[in-house]
Amino acid sequence: MIELEDVAYSYGGAELFSGLSLKLAPGSFHFLTGPSGAGKTTLLKLCYGELLATSGHVMLFEQDAARLDRDQVAMMRRRIGVVHQDCQFLDHLTMRDNVALPLTVSGRSSAFSADLDDLLAWVGLRRQADQLPPQLSGGERQRAALARAVIMSPDVIIADEPTGNIDWEMSQRLLSLLIELNKMGKTILVATHDLNLIRAAKSQVSSRVLRLKDRQLQQAGAEL
Ligand SMILES: Nc1ncnc2c1ncn2[C@@H]1O[C@H](COP(=O)(O)OP(=O)(O)OP(=O)(O)O)[C@@H](O)[C@H]1O
């Protein structure tokens, strides 16, 4: 589904990592952890085609990311829902309109409006639908970001620190939503510093934990 083969990435002249390989099989659940600055966000961006590898191959749905034309990139992006670290909402739009933005941009809003209400209810935000982003708590914003990421019914969900600034109870709630999506067959990749979150997931879902450290990607083990 998403495969990185012997990938290196550099910002300018500074190489962040090299020789990195990763395979996300359909329906798999992966956590990506590692120290701040190790390159987790960068790695996620390679996985959803936001950045192109400096060397090596990134295959997105059996296609070489480096060879996709604009239309193919747009098509591929619809198959991958992204929860960004900072949520990135438009503050002048209601939460309903923010969550619906991917539909609006692709011209499918009317056909999906009933689904939108269901989706807001699923993440527990029906009451907040007409509020603006600054009026929501951190946990509510994160759940709205997840709703927006899944509104196009993607095959893969990539989340960057989705529980970054929220309390444990809200983190658990977000984790439950991700697990539910995985049980529906979605492929999940979550970058997180939160080892307690990973431990909590382990009793509920079969997942793999990878650690990006010292420019290498390793399977995490005993400490979890
Ligand atoms: N656009 C950019 N230009 C230059 N350097 C960058 C850019 N984006 C990130 N970096 C650098 O690359 C390194 C890795 O950044 P990245 O955000 O991928 O790490 P991270 O593991 O996600 O960190 P954190 O856990 O703190 O979010 C950092 O040293 C960062 O300063």
Image: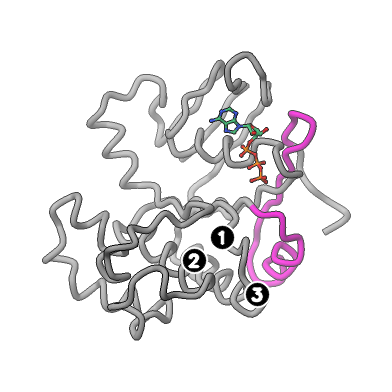
* Residue bounds of the magenta highlight: 192-217
Marks 2 and 3 sit apart, C-alpha to C-alpha, by: 12 Å
Ligand 1 visible in quadrant: top right
Front position in the image: 125 or 55: 125
Quick check: 126 left or right of 183?
left
Quadrant position of the C terminus in the picture = bottom right
Front position in the image: 83 or 198: 83
Q: Are marks 2 and 3 in contact (CB under 8 Å)?
A: no
Q: Position of residue 108 (x, y in %)?
A: 15, 57
Q: Which of marks 1 and 2 is nearer the N terminus?
A: 2
Question: Which residue is depicted at the point 56% across and 16% down?
Answer: 55
Task: Please identify, in this view, whether the residue under mark 3 or under mark 1 is nearer the observer.
Answer: 3
Q: Quadrant of residue 166?
A: bottom right
Marks 3 and 1 sit apart, C-alpha to C-alpha, by: 12 Å
Quick check: 223 left or right of 209?
right
Identify the mark at residue 162; answer none if there is no mark: 1
Q: Which amino acid type corresponds to the residue marked 2 in the rendered image?
A: Gln
Identify the mark at residue 167; answer none if there is no mark: 3
Q: In this view, does 71 lie above or below 11?
A: below
Mark 2, residue position: 142
Q: In which quarter of the image is residue 136?
A: bottom left
